[in-house]
Image (cartoon, rainbow, N blue to C red):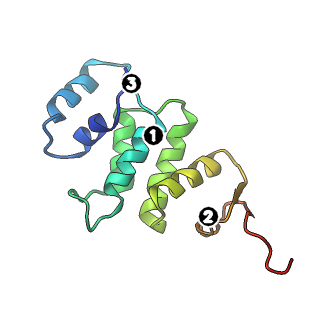
Amino acid sequence: MYVETDFLTALVKDEDWLREPAVRAVEEREDVHTSILAYAEVLVLFYDRERAEYEIDIPRAVANLLEMVPVSPDPHEEAVLAAATFVDEYEMTPFDALHAGVAATGNETVLSSEQDYDLLALDREPLEPDPEE
């Protein structure tokens, strides 16, 4: 059973009008899963800690959520875990963190102008032109 963001946020928040049915679904069903997109939305919801309605420990919350609601395909689960850490530790935007997570877990080189990837020691090929050329 595919679930989306409202399901995940109901599980993260202590009080949510959908929390009880979401918890019940996780307990009663073995096929609950989602995509990297739903987790991207969760990361966006909690990214700006000053404006977020709820303060959470992003890496811990995402790790706990993944135990209940795995990501399909499987390799994206590791990317989501990595992204949660990148958002928390390096203050990356959720989308840059997810791109970095996919690249890092897939041993990929990133062709990008985004220099935040350099902080993670990812193999980045600069997209920006060489100023000496």
Q: Residues within 10 Å of mark 3 (few under 14, many from 20)?
A: few
Report the amino acid beneath label 3. Tyr
When the figure is inspected, residue 10 is found, relative to residue 85, above or below; the finding is above
When the figure is inspected, residue 65 is found, relative to residue 119, above or below; the finding is above
Q: Which residue is mark 3?
A: 2
Q: Position of residue 99 (x, y in %)?
A: 57, 51
Residue at far bottom of view: 132
Q: Quadrant of residue 74?
A: top right
Q: Quadrant of residue 126?
A: bottom right
Question: Residue 96 versus residue 123: which sits nearer the camera?
Answer: 96
Report the amino acid beneath label 2. Tyr
Residue at 86% x, 77% y: name it.
133
Camera-nearest label, 1 or 2: 1
Residue at 13% x, 44% y: name it.
15
Q: CA distance from mark 3 to mark 2?
A: 31 Å
> In the rendered view, does 86 fall on the left or right side of 123?
left
Q: CA distance from mark 1 to mark 2?
A: 20 Å
Q: Which residue is mark 2?
A: 117
> In the rendered view, does 6 fall on the left or right side of 69?
left
Q: Position of residue 86 (x, y in %)?
A: 49, 60
Q: Which residue is mark 1?
A: 37
Q: Position of residue 3 (x, y in %)?
A: 35, 28
